Amino acid sequence: MHRLLLLLIALFSFSSAEENQRGKGCLGSTAASVAVFGKDGSAGSATIGYSYLVKTTYTDEHSCVYILPPHGQKDNEGRYPYYMGYKDEGNQWKKINGTITIQGSNISDNDPDYGQTVTTVLYTHLDGGCDVTTFQGATGNNNVGGPYLELWYHSGASQFALECCKGEFEKQLKNFKSTDVREINQGCNYADVIEQKS
């Protein structure tokens, strides 16, 4: 009986510790700099990897959207150059150049396909791995509209981090009028394109 009691206490303690760890593990940030560069990252860091769009409420979004981290240094206006890509209607990869500026929770983007847009970070996992964001056209950009809710995964993310972001995405989705969600990364193989950084 004594051993059984000790075992139950040990199991309860382990379960409580696991729950505490799980709660701490889902701590995130709304800082755009953390979402773009990672907690300790910098532009051009080889450890950053790439990000790919998993889900969005933007029904006109392209398939297989991915983004490489900014490369090089920011210019005098604070703009970082970066590459992104997607599959077009002919199922061919298309790669485009763009620039971003970062301020607070916002990532302001300018590229030839989407025009001027603003991505706002609602949640980025502090250990890296994933982001929940909104995406919308900047003032005067009627091509995109929005805001739309997005779920992004980073390459090399842990399964636990992804579960945190999935939960946050579902929570945020309740605040949106449209709950129609497109899965963007179905049938995508990014291996052929992510290393082509120029």
Image: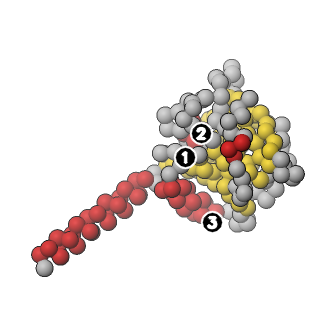
Q: Position of residue 183 (x, y in %)?
A: 71, 60
Q: Position of residue 67 (x, y in %)?
A: 69, 41
Q: Residues within 10 Å of mark 2 (few under 14, many from 20)?
A: some
Q: Which residue is mark 3?
A: 174
Residue in the picture at 41% in, 58% down: 23
- Residue in the image at 53% along x and 38% along y: 38
Vertical placement of 16 versus 42: above or below? below
Q: How much space separates mark 1 and mark 2, taking CA atoms?
A: 8 Å
What is the spatial separation of the Cα atoms under label 3 and label 2, in whole angstroms? 31 Å
Q: Is residue 143 left or right of residue 105?
A: right
For the residue pair 195 and 41, the one nearer the viewer reads as 195
- Residue at coordinates 64% horizontally, 45% vertically from top-left? 51
Residue ranking furthest to the right: 90
Q: Residues within 10 Å of mark 1 (few under 14, many from 20)?
A: some
The disc, 3 or 2, on the residue closer to the chain's N-terminal end is 2
Describe the element under mark 1 as helix, strand or loop.
Answer: loop
User: What residue is disc 1 on?
Assistant: 156
Residue receiving disc 2: 49
Tell whether label 1 touches label 3 (CB within 8 Å): no
Residue type at numbered disc 1? Gly
Q: Earlier in the sequence, mark 1 or mark 2?
A: 2
Q: Amino acid at mark 3?
A: Lys
